[in-house]
Image (tube, rainbow, N blue to C red):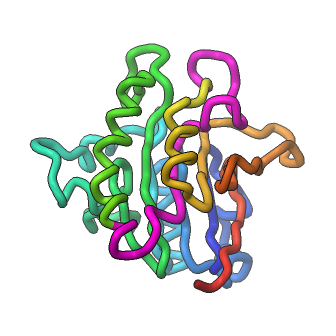
Amino acid sequence: MKILCISDHIDPLVYSNSIKERFKDIDMVLSAGDLPMEYLEFIVSSLNKSLFFVFGNHNLNELYRYKTSGMIGYRNWISEDATYGSGAVHIGSKARMEEGLIIAGLGGSRRYNRGENQYTEFQMNFEIIKLIPILIINRIFRGRFLDILLTHAAPRGIHDKEDPCHRGFKAFLWFMRVFKPKYLIHGHIHLYDLSDLRTTRYKDTLVVNAFSHYIIEIGEK
């Protein structure tokens, strides 16, 4: 299975008339945030493939549509098919089984100016806690917690920066040690030289920076 991972930058190789030919063998698209919904809609309509996304700390005009409220329940854990015309499915603080893969999402960045969709370390730990029940259900009935964690921010010390905005979450390191996803796909960290480091192995997880676009290939189950 080939997955097109995108984040933070409208890539002219993706946003083009040749997208169908260039990415004809893509099976799924994952967006790690900071992209306009119109861009996601273009990709969905062009490739006719499932696209799952989290919000970052920019391009938040439609965040209010996808926010859940009330008590934590089963419907909060499982991604609902609310697309609001874009065809893209929000997976922030939810989990989803798609094409044989279990995908969970944690959007937002570190809190740096009290803006929308920003989290302290404590708050991100709470977002993880909300996911734990469905991850345990997956472990019992599917033999694993999940395959892919889709985030906006990077883990602390892996691809992140030292400024308050781009500092990663320690909570993601704990998540990878405990729940052992095969991949953690993040955005938020811009690569001005696309030959810069994109992938880093941490324990059982390959951490991937999805800036602009990047393709991962997962073997058949």
For the point 18% across and 59% down, which residue is it? 74
**Which quarter of the figure is the N terminus placed in?**
bottom right
In the image: residue 71, left or right of residue 134: left
Does residue 181 lie above or below 209 as drawn?
A: below
Q: Residue furthest left?
A: 70
- Left or right of 98: which side holds 193? right
- Asked if residue 184 shows in the view, the reply is yes
| Number of disc labels | 0
* Residue in the foreground of this view, choosing between 86 and 153: 153
Please tell me whether the stretch drawn in magenta is mainly helix, strand or loop: loop
> Quadrant location of the C terminus?
bottom right
| Residue 33 visible here | no
Outermost residue to the right: 195
Residue occupying image coordinates x 59% and y 30%: 168
What is the span of residues highlighted in magenta in the rendered image? 138-166
Q: Nearer the viewer, residue 137 or 44?
A: 137
Measured from the top left, where is residue 100 in percent x and y? 47, 80
Residue 146 lies in the magenta stretch? yes
User: Residue 201: horizontal and vertical position, in percent?
Assistant: 74, 50
Decide if residue 147 is on the left or right side of residue 182: left
Residue at 54% x, 74% y: name it.
28
Q: Is residue 88 magenta?
A: no
Rendered location of residue 47, percent (x, y): 55, 78
Q: Position of residue 7 (x, y in %)?
A: 60, 49
Return the residue nearer the eye: 87 or 95.
95
Picture layout, residue 185 above or below residue 107: below
Residue 11: image quadrant is bottom right
Residue drawn at x 86%, y 41% is 193
